[in-house]
Image (spheres, helix red, strand yellow):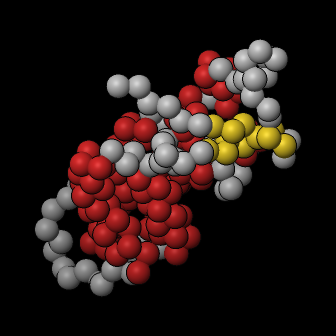
Amino acid sequence: VGLVHLVRVIQGGEAKKASKRLGTAVPLHELLMLIGASATRFFLISKPLSTPLDLDLDLARSQKEENPVYYAQYAYVRLAGILRKAKEQNLAGSVELGRPETSVAPLQDAEAQLLVLGFRLPEVLEDIVRTWEVQRLPQYALEFARAVHRFYDTVPVLRTEERDLLRTRLALTVAAQTVLAVVFDLLGVEKREVM
């Protein structure tokens, strides 16, 4: 079975005319060198095969939130940063899961959204296997990354005084990083600890 995706390469705001005869076609190995393996994989499966794909090389190379690969990787970096700081502050033992000794406060909206989205991953994967709509995985990665950024911006994980709540928040951080790691492994996207 051969899969073909019509890709229009955009550079400097202009679509490049692809022609093998004129030598203006961009072979896959060149694309890999221009934007890297992670961005190539992510962008190439981000749209259905039945839909033409505009691949903006400038966007794919940028280190900005508008670049979906960078945005998703930065979410992973933020989670890694929380866990690294927890270890530096000797809070890493708090990640050990167990029954809380006291009642824990209700989840904030950002925590609940992250938890719900994390639990949706198996369902998304089952749907992808059933429908072959692989573009759903990068879409899920972006939705989950948005939830991670919201969590990071609104939940003071390491400033949590109450030990059981701290344990819960660190466990959620570990779980979110695990979900992103699984998605990145499936997409072939590099997991970065720092950016």
Picture coordinates of residue 113, whole percent (x, y): 38, 73
Picture coordinates of residue 183, whole percent (x, y): 38, 45
The mark tally for this picture is: 0
Which quarter shows the C terminus?
top right
Judge whether 97 appears above or below 138 on screen: below
Which corner quadrant of the image does residue 112 belong to?
A: bottom left
Which quarter shows the N terminus?
top left
Residue 125 seen anywhere in this rendered image of the structure? no
**Viewer-proximal residue, 95 or 188?**
188
Residue 105 seen anywhere in this rendered image of the structure? yes
Picture coordinates of residue 187, whole percent (x, y): 43, 38
Judge whether 110 appears above or below 187 on screen: below
Q: Is residue 14 left or right of residue 128?
A: right
The residue under the point 43% across, 75% down is 110
Picture coordinates of residue 12, whole percent (x, y): 86, 41
The residue under the point 72% across, 37% down is 9
The residue under the point 63% across, 37% down is 7
